[in-house]
Amino acid sequence: MKTPVTVLGLGTMGTALARAFLSAGHPTTVWNRTPGRSPELDVLGAVRAVTAAEAVAASPLVVVCLLVDTTVRDTLDGLDLTGKVVVNLTNTTPDQARGLEATTAGAAYLDGGIMAVPAMIGGPHAFILYSGDAQAFEQHQPALAVLARPVYVGADAGLAALYDIALLSAMYGMFGGAQHALALMGSAQVPAAEFTEQLLLPWLTAMLGSVPRMAADLENPPETGSAGSNLAMQAAAYHNLIDTAEAQGVDPMLLRPMGELLQKAVASGHGDEDLAALIRLIA
């Protein structure tokens, strides 16, 4: 028999998690603060608990996917978690994850970062980061794998949240640049779809190839003056990005921070270095 699972929280993501467990044959108990949410789960065989305490008592593996950290704490407060494995898949900060681990007395704790949207759960491209109790992860890895590819990043319960925030930071930075580019092209009535398919996406894909080199330069800094396009050159030309945006009526708010960082790097004596120097500067 497959491991019985409890899912606390039936928002869009929680519902997707419960559906994946049910589809894989795991006996699944669900609970939500608003009763009757996601009735399609009943057809799949979900057992609805009236209270969070009843839901936790039903399964050895308790997966929590609620709105925010405060909601998780309020829900788990006072519940008997003895002998349970609590997997918190609510988006949190590293400190919140460590704090929650400290309050789940008697339970093994895993914190998770879901790197997927709900529609991707159970599919081949989703993965979920986990940190915390290594033994609990090993024990329940087969069950967790039905949600997405499980990636364990360490015993520190805050690490999954840190990895999650780092990846989301990269995503939003990339999206911000793409959104600015589309606004710029839109100011000249350039068709967005054609520009994106023919130029923007290939350009971003090519530029992403430089990220591994930046990472390598962090660990083994290159010789001074070896940068092909050094920061001084880039800083000198960067004002053209701001000037063009303003001339086209596009707010350069997404571009200004990088320009300021480039100027700071040059002023600090890093003008003959490459982009990896910016990482050291903000760190």
Image (cartoon, helix red, strand yellow):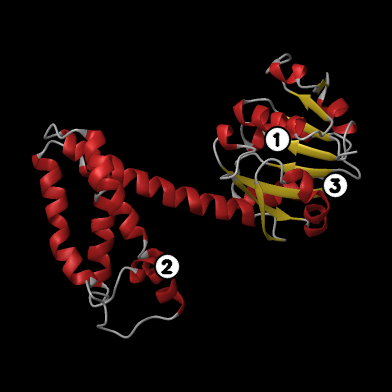
Question: Which residue extends farthest bottom?
Answer: 223
What amino acid is labelled 1 in the image?
Val
Q: What is the x, y in percent for residue 26?
A: 82, 34
**Relative to residue 51, is residue 193 drawn left or right?**
left
Residue 72: assigned label:
1
- Between the C-alphas of marks 2 and 3, the distance is 39 Å
Nearer to us in this view, 180 or 194 = 194
Nearer to us in this view, 147 or 283 = 147
Q: Looking at the image, which residue is at 83% across and 52% down?
A: 139
Q: Looking at the image, which residue is at 17% across and 69% down?
A: 233
- Between the C-alphas of marks 1 and 2, the distance is 37 Å
Q: Secondary structure at mark 1?
A: helix
Q: Looking at the image, which residue is at 50% across and 54% down?
A: 166
Q: Secondary structure at mark 2?
A: helix
Residue 107: assigned label:
3
Q: Residues within 10 Å of mark 2 (few under 14, many from 20)?
A: few
What amino acid is labelled 3 in the image?
Ala
